[in-house]
Amino acid sequence: MLTLKIIREQTATVVERLAVKGFDAKAIVAEIVALDDERKATQTALDANLAQQNATAKEIGALVKQSSKEAAEAAKASVAELKALSLELAQKLEAAERSLRDKLVLLPNLPSEQVPAGKTAEDNVVARQGGSIPTLAGSTAPHWELAKKYDIIDFELGNKLTGAGFPVYKGKGAKLQRALISFFLDENTAAGYREVMPPHMVNAASGFGTGQLPDKEGQMYHATADDFYLIPTAEVPVTNIYRDVILNVAELPVMLTAYTPCFRREAGSYGKDVRGLNRLHQFDKVEIVRIELPENSYAALESMVAHVESIVKKLALPYRILKLCGGDMSFASALTFDFEVYSAAQQKWLEVSSVSNFECFQANRLKCRYRAEDKKTHLLHTLNGSSLALPRIVAALLENNQTEKGIHIPPALQSYTGFDVIC
């Protein structure tokens, strides 16, 4: 959530930068400024009213001592009127604050100056590319056919048990999943990230803190009886560990990693691009989260991108890193880099990771702060990235490494899988 300070002091800049995301902020920013003016005026009136109440109440005692009964009664009547006005002003203040919050949460985060202009994914900029796209010999098959051939992923059984988008992993397919999770976690912890195991459901406050609510409510599974939400990513519970927390500078940076299943309704996702593992309602992902001093957050972002890149390289997958344009960015992000790996069988790029800096946008919602040397508290910056999401990694591994004798496992994974080929 953008701070009022930024909106009031940089009004023109806010409108200009949000236009890069394709968001017309003129009207809502004007409403926010007007509501804030109303809030301030009401608070001033309420403070003056309460001061007058206190002063008049003191007068009553003096008038009683002086046996000025009529004056004392008049003063009591005045206090009663002031109390009624105070209640009215308090209700007006609460309404103004509520309206102000409701408007503030509608504004996306400001995109960084580094964000390229553009409206769709076609306008994203390739930051760099690595690995070699394999040339597959003989007949090739997409991963959903390979999964059936080797009996490692059962999409039809998942459809029977739950519905489309909930596959069942079997045999070496299940072992490959477990191997990738362990491999990713080990890579992350070796890089200095501390592993945590968070809940897979969160309350509404947690969803609000990281920006999923109210923006993405329709994409989340909601357990209505308890008002809990199944997490769309480990970012939500892990970042919320520091909701309403004030950190000391010595405790920074915070670097955490977590494996969780992720749940996304993905409403409206249909067609050939969602076949097999390309788009699921439940999938496994390992996440990295950082909480940083504002002046260090962009160096931290570069470090996170380099770390994810090192893992993709170890999997020997052809990849490219995209700097997302304004129109393709998320609601909460200030700058995002997407990782894509190439699927030789499907002959297309598959997104496997997003690494983002949210600057103080999430921290303002979370009230995640640090105490500076001057003893004042300031908002921190939050970052997160997929390290990595499994489904499309698995799809690319199966498709790119298929041979007539089976599917070869990259050397980096073999000590985790316990086998070097799926046949």
Image: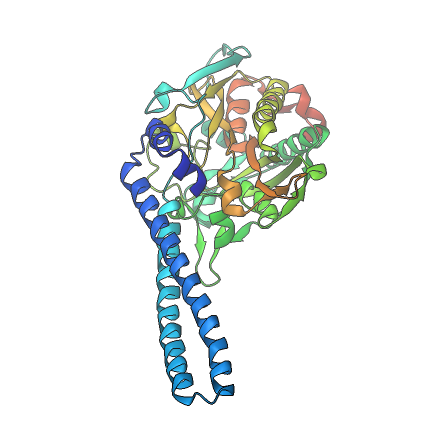
Task: Examine the rendered structure and indicate whether residue 165 appears above or below residue 275.
Answer: below
Percent position of residue 151, x then y: 54, 34
Percent position of residue 349, x then y: 44, 20
Q: Quadrant of the C terminus?
A: top right
Task: Examine the rendered structure and indicate whether residue 145 appears above or below residue 58.
Answer: above
Residue found at x 45% / y 63%: 225
Residue found at x 48% / y 25%: 338
The extreme front residue here reads: 66
Task: Examine the rendered structure and indicate whether residue 385 appears above or below residue 87.
Answer: above
Closer to us: 115 or 373: 373
Q: Is residue 409 visible?
A: no
Closer to us: 347 or 47: 47
Closer to us: 346 or 364: 364
Figure label count: 0
Q: Quadrant of the N terminus?
A: top left
Residue found at x 63% / y 35%: 181
Percent position of residue 380, x then y: 58, 38
Q: Is residue 22 visible?
A: yes
The extreme left residue here reads: 27
Percent position of residue 53, x then y: 44, 72
Q: Is 423 placed left or right of 125 in the picture? A: right
The coloring applied to the image is rainbow
Q: Is 298 placed left or right of 57 in the picture? A: right
Q: Quadrant of residue 421?
A: top right
Q: Quadrant of residue 27?
A: top left
Closer to us: 190 or 45: 45
